[in-house]
Image: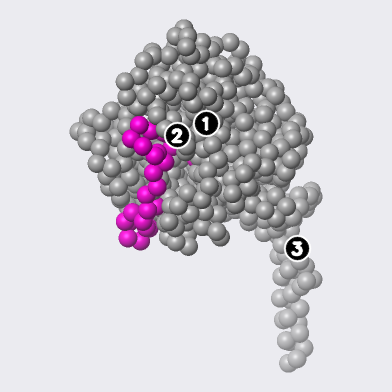
Amino acid sequence: MLLLVFVVPPASMQQNTTGYSWLHPGFDDAATYFNPQNALNKDNLAYVNQDWMSSLSNEPRIYGNETARTTSSLLDINGLLYFIDRSQIVLALDSKDARLIWSQQLTVADPNHFGIENVFVHNRLINYFDKTIWLIDLDCSLKGYSASNGAIQVNISPSVLCGDNPAGTALHDTPHRELSAPVFYEKGRIIVVAPSGFETKDRASAYVLGINLDTQQVAWKTSLTENPQENLKLGVGPWAVDQVKGVVYIGTGSPIPEWNASKRSGANLYSDSILALDAATGKILWNFQATPHDLNGYGCTGNTVLGERDGKKVVYAACRNGYLYALDADNGKPIWTFDPPAVKRLNSDNNDPSKPWLNYPSKDATIQCPGVYGAVSSNIVLAYGNIYISTFNRCSKIDVAPVSNIGDTGVKNVTLLEDPVGPVNSTLYSVDAATGKAKWSIPFINGTALKGGLTVSGGVLYLPSPDGHLYAYDAASGSQVWSRSFGTLGLAIPPVIGATAHGNWTLIQVVAGTPSLDFTIEQHSGFLFMFILPQNLVTTTATSTETNPISDMIIYAVVAVAILLLVTTIIFFLRRRR
């Protein structure tokens, strides 16, 4: 009976603790968006219950179902949720009951200070390292808040990240702005960060920085332009970090001006690229350029993913041109390229360096596919030996305009780029990470461009959709296993899988407007939803998921009886010895 006390712990003690916390925007340093937990899985997902809902701040709708600003990505650390609300407040909530632990107000609009306070922000990331929540503020300062109480730990001046840009500095006009988060090289205590989102009309922000975490001084600065006539956007990431080799893999955006290269001299070598940088020195180790002489705005702005294939490390990335790449992590050479069959292509292959715009010499408006938002959603996922990716068709009308400097857009009216031309549709793919061959694909809802992100965990692929649903698919087969409707407000931010401080497995979803621009329903509010899995359904171990018919209450009762019998036996033995 004594043996039973040790070999039959309650189910809540049996479960695998891997994945309790979602520490980084892409879950881990490899930016995989894959939580390897298997407690919440395709067999019990249907039994999750909505435990609470918390309101977010209101934001004006600017177009369709898109709000002026969205929330940041979520972090779920030791039972606490961290994110930036749309009102520029950093929040820490207890995931058990949404109780506020701490909050901090970030920068508010100040016309006398350089920043992007009055520019719409549609994609934003935060990160965690050294017991600190890290973010880039809208004034271009780099801030770190204590994860436990919200006290400011680090406040690095905007001049470090963005230079000495005076008030009123003109930003590059763009219909979609994103803010990245710093990543960390732990051994060297280096913050790797770029002024992503702060694209000025010159090359003043086209670089990556390494900042010493302890001294808060710049350790290195790597320019991604080679002459004063070049300019480019930085990717939002998140970026993968190889902590063993000390290498960070970053993605870059398109050269500026995107659609008219008349004033864009030079090779623009580092635009539309995946680069490997030495995290200690900033040295560029290799560069893979997906779209040379880009005339379509096809940057590689999403996450870079670090994986392994046959004992060799591989970098996976998808660019806005719609292609998915597998690159040798040692040298950047392509291993394979996946061209999604569903992606429509028109006026998209422009590699002639002498060509100034896509339909040159004509000055008539023309159509490009993929459109200005590209063909790939926010992030890809590496899980179970597969890459999961969603693509979409949303063609754009390009009406090229003359340019006078490198910060111009090269189109007559940038707001007209938001209007889709022709059919809009999306497709979900599972691609073999070793071969680049599609295992399955799902044509998604017609009329919807999936611009949001993906999450994989417990054998389930989660897809937040602008039609107001969170969909869940069997990651192995692609069959739908669950869905949840949130009404008319669209979804875009990937859900996170974690656990409360008491070990209850949770699914957290932000519903706060979507970057898909194809809706006419006005909605200003936003919400944070928490779903919880009843503990009696948690029966996993570190290696398997199996049905356990014995509930926690029964096991606790058996344990109590065993302890009672043990105590009785000891008392009886002691009395007999007397």
Vertical order, 119 against 307 (above or below): above
Nearest the eye: 220 or 73: 220
Amino acid type of the residue that numbered disc 1 sits on in the rendered structure: Pro
Q: Residues within 10 Å of mark 3 (few under 14, many from 20)?
A: some
Q: Mark 2 vs mark 1: which is more N-terminal?
A: 2
Q: Residue 8 bears which disc, if any?
A: 3
In this picture, which residue range is highlighted in magenta? Answer: 210-237
The reply, left or right, for residue 536 in relation to residue 57 is right
Callout 2: SS:
loop
Nearest the eye: 337 or 497: 337
Is residue 305 visible in this depiction of the protein?
yes
Q: Residue at x 67, y 53 (%)?
A: 312
Amino acid type of the residue that numbered disc 3 sits on in the rendered structure: Val
- Residue ID for mark 1: 292
Amino acid type of the residue that numbered disc 2 sits on in the rendered structure: Asn
- Residue ID for mark 2: 268
